[in-house]
């Protein structure tokens, strides 16, 4: 557990579709019309109404995010973020991944969310190296919270397995020990 201003950040091994938070983030693709992994699980749990709203959004560029209602999910909203496919690191993947987290945080703050949960965007089918992705995820949300404290009070990094959980715990520990002025 790490606190940044009034926001608590924690990692948990949990299925993100079970979380009753103000917004869960989806690791979507540019069509926003569903897929496998966490995207498939979110659409299954939310029901067909989610797909119907997604069909009105006109897709989403990589590095960006769009927001919908949560429908059958315990979460009130879904923020659909499109992470980059890992292509070796020389195609702007790190910046695009950071951009996903920044855009998702902005949407959550704009809609006055107090609680939000993120999966490890791009770390599954899109093959982004997990340790680097976790570093980007944690540093980008911390930077965003420091720049725009806003409404968010609780942030969960939802991990599908213990290995991913340990990576987040290590990263959150590093930031707990670092002075607040450390560059994100
Ligand atoms: N709760 C939390 N984490 C999960 C869950 C869950 N229910 N299910 C999977 N994960 P991925 P990507 C983890 O592949 O790499 C889809 O087809 C998983 O273990 O879902 O961004 C989309 O439509 C991994 O750590 O997303 C896109 O086409 C992380 O979530 C594409 O996959 C992300 O894995 C996006 O690929």
Image (cartoon, rainbow, N blue to C red):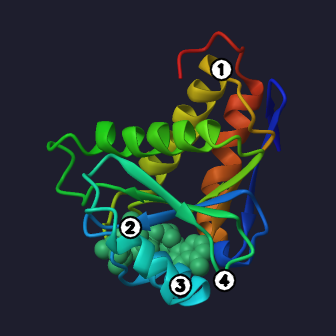
As measured in the structure, the alpha-carbon distance from the residue carrying label 4 to the one carrying label 2 is 18 Å
Mark 3, ligand 1, within 8 Å: the answer is yes
The mark nearer the N terminus, 1 or 2, is 2
Q: Which residue is mark 2?
A: 28
Disc 4 element = loop
As measured in the structure, the alpha-carbon distance from the residue carrying label 3 to the one carrying label 1 is 32 Å
Q: What residue lies at 68% left-to-right and 33% top-to-bottom?
A: 174
Q: Are marks 3 and 4 in contact (CB under 8 Å)?
A: no
Q: Are marks 1 and 2 in contact (CB under 8 Å)?
A: no
Whole-percent x and y of residue 17? 66, 77
21 or 121, nearer to the observer: 21
As measured in the structure, the alpha-carbon distance from the residue carrying label 3 to the one carrying label 4 is 12 Å
Q: Pointer 4: residues within 10 angstroms few (<14), some, or many (20+)?
A: some
Residue 99 against residue 179 in the figure, above or below: below
Q: Can residue 155 be seen from the camera position used here?
A: no
Name the mark on residue 41. Answer: 3
Disc 3 element = helix
The mark nearer the N terminus, 4 or 1, is 4
Q: Which residue is mark 4?
A: 72
Q: Quadrant of ligand 1?
A: bottom left
Q: Which residue is mark 1?
A: 146
The mark nearer the N terminus, 3 or 4, is 3
Q: Are marks 3 and 1 in contact (CB under 8 Å)?
A: no
Whole-percent x and y of residue 133? 44, 49
Name the mark nearer the viewer: 4 or 1: 4
């Amino acid at each position: 557990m790490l606190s940044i201003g009034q926001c608590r950040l924690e990692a948990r091994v949990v299925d993100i579709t079970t979380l009753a938070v103000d917004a869960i983030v989806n690791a979507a693709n540019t069509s926003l019309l569903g897929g496998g992994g966490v995207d498939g699980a979110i659409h299954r749990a939310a029901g067909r109404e989610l797909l119907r709203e997604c069909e009105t959004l006109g897709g989403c560029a990589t590095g960006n995010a769009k927001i919908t209602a949560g429908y059958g999910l315990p979460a009130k909203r879904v923020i659909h973020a499109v992470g980059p496919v890992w292509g070796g690191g020389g195609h702007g993947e790190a910046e695009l991944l950071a951009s996903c987290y920044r855009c998702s945080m902005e949407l959550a703050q704009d809609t006055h969310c107090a609680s939000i949960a993120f999966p490890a965007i791009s770390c599954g089918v899109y093959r982004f190296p997990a340790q680097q992705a976790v570093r980007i995820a944690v540093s980008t949300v911390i930077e965003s919270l420091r720049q725009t404290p806003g409404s968010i009070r609780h942030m969960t990094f939802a991990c599908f397995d213990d290995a991913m959980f340990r990576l987040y715990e290590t990263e959150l520990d590093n930031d707990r020990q670092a002075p607040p002025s450390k560059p994100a």
